[in-house]
Image (cartoon, helix red, strand yellow):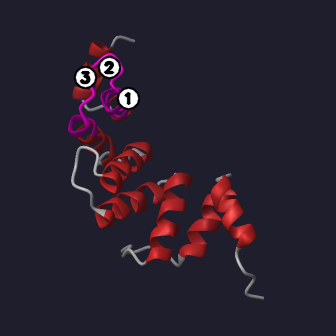
C-alpha cells in the first residue's frame, strides 16, 4: 500500500492506519523521520482505544521522542494499553509500580501486572515472577 493511501485512511480516522503512519514517520519509512508527527499519529490511534497506539505513545513519553519526556504521562498511557490487553504495557505498568511512579486506578500491585503479562507470554514478566521471592 502506498504511504499516501495509508495516510488518507489515517486522516479519515482509521486507528490502524494512524498507527501504521505513526510507525512509518517514527522510523522514516518512505517519509521523513519526524518524531513529533509520529507521536501525533499514535495519539490519534490511542484516543480511539488502539492498544498499540497507546503503547507507542507511552514509549514516546517515556523516551522524550517527539513529546516531552514525562514518566507519569507515559505510565498513564501504558496503563490504558495494559487495560486494553497489551502485555508489553502490562510489564511497564508493573515496573512503574515497583519504581513508585503513580498509576491511578492501577488494579493492584506490581505483581498483579507481572502475572497478567506473564500469562500472555511476556518473557521478561515470566522471568521476573520466576526470580521473585516467594511469599508463602
Extreme right residue here?
136
Q: CA distance from mark 1 to mark 3?
A: 14 Å
Q: Is 119 within the magenta?
A: no
* Residue 51 visible here: yes
Q: Which residue is mark 2?
A: 6
Q: Position of residue 54 (x, y in %)?
A: 37, 49
Where disc 2 sits, the SS reads: helix
Q: CA distance from mark 1 to mark 2?
A: 8 Å
Contact (CB < 8 A) between labels 1 and 2? yes
Task: Identify the image quadrant of residue 23.
Answer: top left
Q: Which residues are magenta?
A: 18-38
Magenta portion: prevailing SS class: helix
Is residue 80 left or right of 65 when viewed as pictured? right
In the drawing, what numbered circle is on residue 20?
1
Q: Which residue is mark 3?
A: 32
Where disc 3 sits, the SS reads: loop
* Residue 85 visible here: no
Q: Position of residue 40 (x, y in %)?
A: 23, 40
Residue 12 against residue 50 in the figure, above or below: above
Residue plotted at (27% across, 14% down): 4
Residue 12 against residue 48 in the figure, above or below: above
- Total labels drawn: 3
Amino acid at each position: 500500500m502506498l504511504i499516501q493511501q495509508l495516510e488518507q485512511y489515517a486522516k479519515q480516522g482509521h486507528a490502524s492506519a494512524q498507527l501504521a503512519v505513526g510507525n512509518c514517520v517514527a522510523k522514516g519509512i518512505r517519509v521523513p523521520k519526524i518524531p513529533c508527527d509520529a507521536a501525533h499519529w499514535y495519539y490519534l490511534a490511542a484516543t480511539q482505544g488502539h492498544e498499540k497506539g497507546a503503547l507507542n505513545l507511552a514509549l514516546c513519553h517515556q523516551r522524550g521522542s517527539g513529546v516531552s519526556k514525562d514518566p507519569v504521562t507515559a505510565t498513564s498511557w501504558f496503563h490504558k494499553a495494559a487495560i486494553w490487553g497489551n502485555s508489553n504495557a502490562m510489564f511497564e505498568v508493573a515496573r512503574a509500580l515497583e519504581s513508585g511512579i503513580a498509576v491511578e486506578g492501577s488494579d493492584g500491585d506490581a505483581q498483579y501486572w507481572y502475572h497478567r503479562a506473564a500469562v500472555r507470554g511476556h518473557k521478561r514478566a515470566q522471568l521476573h515472577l520466576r526470580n521473585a521471592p516467594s511469599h508463602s
